[in-house]
Image: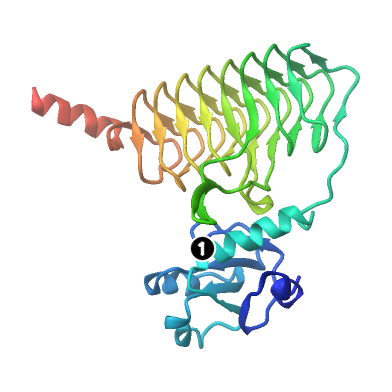
């Protein structure tokens, strides 16, 4: 899509026309040809380091610093608000994807008290959905998966902006994609991706305990286990066979490598390498944490 295709409808000020296929925040880019935004000059180096942005929204006050950038440039006094205005326009006009009627495999077992959205849901063979589960739009569930009572799948995540003078949650256009043989226990909350370019994904054989929160754009690898009351913030990437302990907190944008272990109550604010075990608030290497504890005693 060209920016000029929507600029008249939204009264966007163009410095230079450009194209885009996706929308994405500069700190969470997953696909090429993305439209993003910059609110401060200090983020310009981030743009210089990526080849995934094809168009960008910037303030006119520092628009003369983009000679290096060959893509489209939109001028705005509030780049973030203009960005989300474009996002809402794409949702309202079905420009992200075309809606379809919900499809449920005949072998799926769905409790009478469960609520399934009438469109944009795909439920595979032998899926079990227990009482009071809510499956909202933009959800795909693979075969042999079980979702236990009280869980909500594909709610909007926590992304806000000031709209018409009022702080509101931004509509989410991405998906929750749940693989095969997944076990989701009671009262989980799983948010859909903010954009289709970064969906929330639970790979095959992922298991979650009760009261787990999985934010928008989180992507969880094969056979990962997440214990009770853990909180996984937005755009986190968990590798395969990761262990997330009870009440652990994973900060947004973190990447945790295959077979890493996050012990109970840990607060993770930095990437964790493969096979690494971390502990504490803020989390550090588990062995170092124990050594520090000995020194305190």
Q: Position of residue 119 (x, y in %)?
A: 82, 36
Q: Is residue 223 above or below residue 171?
A: above
Q: Position of residue 45 (x, y in %)?
A: 42, 73
Residue at 63% from the left image edge and 47% from the top image edge: 171
Quarter of image, res 5: bottom right
Q: Secondary structure at mark 1?
A: helix
Q: Nearer the viewer, residue 142 or 256?
A: 142
In the picture provided, is 137 more to the left or to the right than 256?
right
Q: Nearer the viewer, residue 124 or 238?
A: 124
Residue at 57% from the left image edge and 73% from the top image edge: 56
In the picture provided, is 109 more to the left or to the right than 75?
right
Quarter of image, res 286: top left
Q: Give the quadrant of the C terminus.
A: top left
Q: Give the quadrant of the N terminus.
A: bottom right
Q: Nearer the viewer, residue 103 or 240?
A: 103
Name the residue that disc number 1 marks: 80
Q: Position of residue 51 (x, y in %)?
A: 58, 71
- In this view of the protein, can residue 71 be seen by the observer? no
In the picture provided, is 72 more to the left or to the right than 63?
right
Q: Nearer the viewer, residue 288 or 124?
A: 124
Residue at 79% from the left image edge and 15% from the top image edge: 110
- Tell me if mark 1 has few (under 14), some (14-19) or many (20+) residues whose alpha carbon lies within 10 angstroms of its own: some
Q: Position of residue 16 (x, y in %)?
A: 63, 85
Q: Is residue 148 above or below residue 245?
A: above
Residue at 56% from the left image edge and 29% from the top image edge: 224
- In this view of the protein, can residue 34 be seen by the observer? yes
């Amino acid at each position: 899509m060209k920016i000029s295709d929507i600029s008249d409808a939204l009264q966007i000020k163009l410095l230079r026309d450009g194209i885009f296929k996706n929308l994405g925040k500069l700190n969470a880019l997953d696909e090429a040809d993305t439209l993003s935004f910059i609110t401060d000059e200090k983020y310009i180096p981030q743009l210089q380091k990526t080849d995934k942005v094809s168009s960008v929204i910037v303030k006119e006050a520092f628009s003369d610093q983009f000679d290096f950038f060959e893509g489209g440039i939109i001028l705005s006094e509030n780049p973030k608000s203009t960005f989300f205005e474009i996002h809402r326009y794409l949702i309202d006009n079905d420009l992200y994807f075309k809606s379809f009627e919900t499809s449920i495999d005949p072998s799926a077992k769905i409790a009478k008290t469960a609520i399934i959205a009438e469109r944009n849901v795909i439920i595979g063979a032998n899926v079990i959905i227990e009482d009071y589960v809510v499956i909202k739009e933009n959800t795909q569930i693979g075969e042999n998966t079980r979702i236990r009572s009280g869980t909500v799948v594909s709610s909007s995540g926590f992304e806000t902006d000031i709209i018409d003078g009022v702080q509101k949650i931004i509509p989410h256009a991405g998906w929750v994609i749940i693989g095969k043989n997944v076990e989701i226990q009671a009262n989980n909350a799983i948010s859909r991706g903010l954009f289709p370019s970064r969906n929330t994904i639970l790979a095959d054989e992922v298991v979650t305990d009760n009261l787990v929160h999985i934010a928008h754009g989180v992507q969880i690898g094969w056979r990962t286990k997440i214990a009770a009351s853990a909180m996984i913030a937005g755009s986190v990437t968990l590798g395969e066979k990761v262990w997330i302990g009870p009440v652990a907190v994973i900060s947004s944008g973190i990447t945790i490598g295959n077979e890493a272990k996050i012990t109970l109550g840990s607060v993770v604010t930095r990437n964790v390498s493969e096979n690494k075990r971390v502990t504490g608030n803020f989390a550090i290497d588990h062995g170092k944490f124990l050594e520090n504890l000995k020194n305190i005693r």
